[in-house]
Image (cartoon, rainbow, N blue to C red):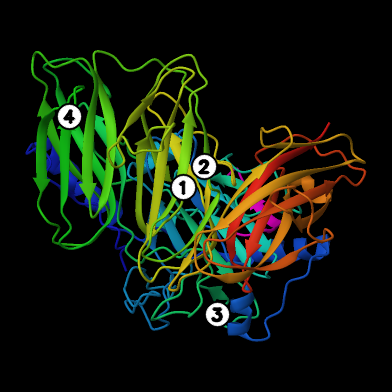
Amino acid sequence: MQIRAIFTVFGLIATSAFADAQDVEDQFFLQPLHAPIDYTLVDAEIEANIERLGLERAPVDSIQALRDDFDRMIFPVRASAGADVFLPQFIGNFVDLDPAGPGSLRDWSCGTRTYDLNSGYDHAGTDISAGPFPAHGMNQRWVDIVAASPGVIIARNHDADDRNCGGLGSSSAANYVSILQDDGLTAYYWHMARDSLTDQEVGDRVEAGDFLGRVGSSGISTAPHLHFELRHPDIPGFVVDPYAGACGESTPLWRHQHDYLDPAITGIFTHNFTPAIPASFCQPEYPRFRTDFSPGDTVYLGVYVRDQGIGAASTVELQDPSGAVMYNRDFDAATAFSASTSFQTSYALPANAATGRWTIRATFQGDVRERAFYVGGDPAAGARLAAAVLPASRSVQAGNPATAFATVLNPSGVTASGCWVSPATPFSGAFEYRETNPATNAITGDVNALFDIPAGGSRSFVLAFTPGAGNLADSYDLLLRYKCDNSDAANMISGVNSILLSFGPTPVPDIVAIAITPSGDGILRVADENSAAAFATAVANVGSAGTLTVRPAARGSASSMRLRICETDPGTGACLAAAADTLSRAFAANESASFAIFARAQGEVVSFAPASTRIQLIAEDAGGVIRGSTSVAVRTN
């Protein structure tokens, strides 16, 4: 069965060159992405390494009970720092849950977004495809693969060819990492790019979010993608589908399962002519990117989207540097579903076109995005970004917005131009950012508008996340990308410039928390490896009433420290009771409280690594779902 990820193009310039490109693009995406993985050799290696390393796999007593106890996972793909797209991926195929013969297809949502083969193979994993320009994205290493769940590497290969040109009959040698997860599942990360794998070896431990490699097309693969598969030898059929739905399991294995149809603008580009994707991945791809134009030039505009539903409409608007609308177009409503498609048009710049930054503003199924091109010269290279978000977590009823404030800084000596903010991992709902006045927090900008940051300057924003009704998230750390045309994205640092989201069908406590260290800079300094220090936290419950467990938690090398917590008198800062490992407290709606967290080093140096070595305050409910969090960096001097 052919893959359902059809690449179609609407509204392109009527040229014979494009007509040829349309044909080959359809051929390129109308193929199964791979044949079955040959588990014979790799599973023998896995079992030998499990035995050699003295590892044990958690057995399956009750399939459903164990599934309820499986670790919830994060999405295993995200954009790299240099990726020039909002989102670098779309779902090509889900697990085929219909065991009948060839042509009988059923995915977790009762759809047919999967495939099987005449050989009897039913697609056994999730194919996360690279787009919108698969060859360019692979060559530029735009798509990172990260561990979905903690565990130990039990097999890997890095030096196989990653540009398969023979289709499904090619060599099965692939680049991959296999991880024995802490919950007993084996996770297979397949088809990676050659020599892109992590330096970690077999036997090394990884945590959720750790870098594993980059998306490629090694092994039996027809296009760059990650085949992500979960298996357990005690489960009939071995394969475990991480998704849950009407025709699948009742419990998802994701911290946040994205919608079956997950429409979004993945990228906006300008070109010097209509781009082309060849019929074969190994033939030249022609993105024809261009961002620097002169008056009188023709600008070819492309809006690239995923999961376009029937009836979906899109618009594009072009603004000159003054903000005046110079061109707009409404595209026809879609007549078929496409997993990855684009809308293209062109605009002839007038002979007296204003120099500076021009803005493309596109809308697609509720998603609003902007990108820039430049008349009279691209911006100077070398901008750098850093970002922070407060509060670090929100917990809301689905359908209601969760808001936070972000600051984006440019510590470089050049202006950062054409900047934007975007979720880096799936989020089923509406995302908006608007620029604010940093002194008053009053909104000053339009929804998802581009911005510039002067050299050595900053910009502030309010972020709004509105999960769709019926969506769920349990302690989901939503990473965010802050990117400009002349900079890589800011480093994504969990607890610093991400936001921890929890949401579901009912009102819940929502603890907004801030932390204050003695130095006032967010760093807890402990005198030496045998000393102690403390920091203060203030919290306010802006959600419904509820009883929560409040506790400190350590990340990175701070895990060697002894942590204690007490509630404090907000006036004096004195503990109201003896410090303990955790405390339970009932929070009324709109109630505030304060806590102190004490950290004692246990004879080990805690090196300064603010991205990974931190101490958190966590407030969680009886089900272990985090309803509030904040953190500080920590070091021993």
Q: Is residue 157 magenta?
A: yes
Kind of residue at disc 2? Val
Q: Residue at x 64, y 86 (%)?
A: 62
Location of residue 189 with respect to 486 vertically, above or below: below
Location of residue 409 with respect to 620 vertically, above or below: above
In the image, taking residue 38 as reference, residue 585 lies left or right, namely right
Q: Secondary structure at mark 2?
A: strand
Front label number (2 vs 4): 2
Magenta segment range? Answer: 149-160
Q: Is residue 592 magenta?
A: no
Could you tell me how far apart the alpha carbons at marks 2 and 4 are, in whole angstroms?
Answer: 30 Å
Q: Are marks 2 and 1 in contact (CB under 8 Å)?
A: yes
The foreground one among 351 and 54 is 351
Mark identifier at residue 237: 3
Which residue is tagged 4? 319
In the image, taking residue 599 as reference, residue 147 lies left or right, namely left
Q: Position of residue 126 (x, y in %)?
A: 46, 63
Q: Is residue 269 visible?
A: yes
N-term-proximal mark, 3 vs 1: 3
Q: Position of residue 332 (x, y in %)?
A: 9, 52
Q: Residue at x 43, y 78 (%)?
A: 97
Mark identifier at residue 466: none
